[in-house]
Image: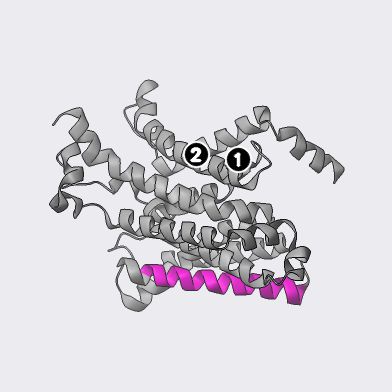
Amino acid sequence: MDMGAEFVQLSLAPILIGILAAVACALPGNFLLLRRQALIGDAISHVALPGIVVAFLVTGTIAAWPMMVGAAGAAVVAVGLIEAIKRLGRVEPGAAMGVVFTTLFAAGVLLLEQSDTSGVHIDVEHALYGNLESLIWFSATGWSSLLDLDALAGLPPQLFRLAVVLAVIVLFMVAFWKELAISTFDPEFARSIGIRTGSVGFALVVAAAIAAVAAFDAVGSIIVIAMFVCPPATARLMTDRLGRQIAWSVLFATTAAIAGYVFAGYGPLWFGSPYAVSAAGMIATVAGVQLGLACLIGPRRRRTGHAAAAQ
C-alpha cells in the first residue's frame, strides 16, 4: 500500500472527525465565552459521563443513540441543577457550575468502577481520551475511495453524526445571529426590543450540549473541554469583531485538530521514541499552545490586560 492510500485509510477519517468535533464545540463556545459561561461547556462534557453509564446500565448496549440520549439527559439535568443552585443558594454561576460538574463527573466515575462494564468498550480512559485513533476507514483503498459509494458507506458513523450536528449548529447561529449577538453584548437592550434573552441563552446551552454529546463518543472529554474554551479565547485575542472572532476560532480549531493529530503520531518519532501519544491529549495541548502564543503576540492582548487591571 502506498503512502497516499495508507493516509486515506488510517488518518483521513480521524482527522476529519477531529476537525468536525473541534469546530462544532468552538462555534457555541464563542458566545459562552463572551457571556462568561465558558465553564458550561466544561460542565456538559463532564456530566455526559454519568449519563452514558446510566444509559448502558438501563439498555445493556453501547449503541450510539442510547448513549447520546443518556448524555443529553444528563446535560439537561446538569443545566437544571446549576440554575437551581444559583437561585436557591445565591452563589455565583462559576461556583454553581464547578460544584455540579465535579460532583456528577465523580458520580460517573464511581458508577463505572462499580458496574460490570469490563466486557464492553466503556471505561474511564475511553471517556477521557475517546477513540479517535481507532476510527479507521477500513474499506478505503486510496483517494479514489472518496468517489466510491460502497467505500463511503464504510466510513466511521461518528463522521456523519458530527457533520449533521455541525450543520445544525451553523443553521442555529445563522438563524438567530441577531438575537445571539445583541443578548450577548447588551442583555438589557435585548429585552427592551423584545428579545427573550432567557430563551436564547437556554437554546445556546442546548446547542452546546448537542455538540458536546456528539463529540464525546469520538474524541473524549479532553478535546471537548479544550475546544469550548481555547479556540474562542485565542480568537478573542485577535479581533474585537464578533464575526471575525468566530472565523478565527474556526481556523484555530481546525489547525489544532490537524497539527495535534500529526504531532501525536509522528512527534515522538522525531525525538527517538517509537510510541505515539494520545491524539486527544496532543490536540488539546496544541490548542493550549495557540492560546499561549496569542497571549504573547495577539493584537488585542493589551485590551484584555487593561480590562483585567481595571477590575
Rendered residue at 59%/42% (across/down) = 244
Q: CA distance from mark 1 to mark 2?
A: 9 Å
Q: Nearer the viewer, residue 102 or 194?
A: 194
The reply to whether the magenta stretch includes residue 213 is no
Residue 78: x %, y % from top left: 57, 70
Specify the quadrant of the image occupied by residue 238: top right
The reply to whether the magenta stretch includes residue 76 is yes
Are the two marked residues, 1 and 2, in contact with CB atoms closer than 8 angstroms?
yes
Three-letter amino acid code of the residue under disc 2: Leu
Q: Nearer the viewer, residue 143 or 82?
A: 143
Q: Nearer the viewer, residue 248 or 206?
A: 248
Rendered residue at 47%/64% (across/down) = 210
Residue 201: x %, y % from top left: 63, 66
Q: Secondary structure at mark 2?
A: helix
Answer whether residue 309 is visible to the viewer in this image: yes
Q: Secondary structure at mark 1?
A: helix
- Circle 2 packing at 10 Å, graded few (<14), some (14-19), many (20+), is some
Rendered residue at 36%/78% (across/down) = 58
Vertical side of 50 occupied by 27: above or below: above
Spot the residue most to the right. Answer: 310
Vertical side of 47 occupied by 275: above or below: above
Vertical side of 109 occupied by 147: above or below: above
Q: Report the residue marked by disc 2.
A: 251
Q: Report the residue marked by disc 1.
A: 235
Residue 139: x %, y % from top left: 15, 47
**What secondary structure is the stretch in magenta mostly built from?**
helix
Q: Nearer the viewer, residue 124 or 187?
A: 187
Three-letter amino acid code of the residue under disc 1: Ala
Rendered residue at 28%/49% (across/down) = 135
Vertical side of 240 occupied by 165: above or below: below
What residue span does the magenta drawing correspond to? Answer: 67-89
Answer whether residue 272 is visible to the viewer in this image: no
